[in-house]
Amino acid sequence: MRYKIGWPFWTLAYKLGATLTFTYRVFKDQHINRYCAYSYDVNGALADAPDVNMVKSQMNDYVLNYIGYNVYGSQDKRIKDRIDKNRVKAYCIIEPSKF
């Protein structure tokens, strides 16, 4: 079963074994010549980096920490190690360049 981060009771769904999903968008900002990413599903999920792979990695790290904090209630730096990465599915949408 898949359940979207941000839906009601998503933390409970994860604890019961559901796979969490989220969508984020990546675009290249021409003014600063960097790739930027944001997500409407995950509060505060923003990232920017010089290349696409780095921005994807930053988004995934942020979301794993976000899940860990919301599910386990801890701000420990290693909390993302407790998250089963096979139960988190990201959907990346590459947008045309903005600005």
Image (cartoon, rainbow, N blue to C red):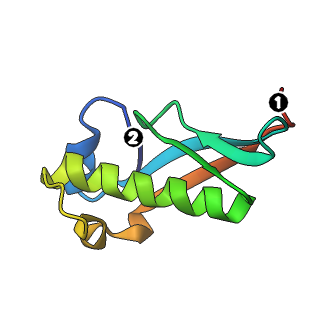
**Residue 46 drawn at (x, y percent):** 52, 40
Residue 92 lies, in percent from the top left, at 66, 49
For the point 37% across and 58% down, the residue is 64
Whole-angstrom CA distance, mark 2 to mark 1, is 26 Å
Q: In this view, does 2 lie above or below 82?
A: above
Quadrant in the picture for residue 5:
top left
Which secondary structure lies at badge 2? loop
Q: Say if mark 2 contacts mark 1, CB within 8 Å.
A: no
**Picture layout, residue 59 above or below residue 41:** below
Q: Residue at x 53, y 58 (%)?
A: 58
Q: Which of 19 and 36 is in front in this view?
A: 36
Q: Residue 98 carries which label?
A: 1
Name which of mark 2 and mark 1 comes first in the sequence: 2
Q: Is residue 62 above or below residue 28?
A: below
Label 2 neighbour load within 10 Å: few <14, some 14-19, many 20+: many
Give the left or right position of residue 79, taking residue 50 as reference: left
In this view, the residue in front, 96 or 6, is 96
| Figure disc tally | 2
Query: Mark 1 falls on what kind of element?
Result: loop
Tag 2 residue: 5
What amino acid is found at the position of numbered circle 2 in the picture? Answer: Ile
Q: What residue type is labelled 1?
A: Lys
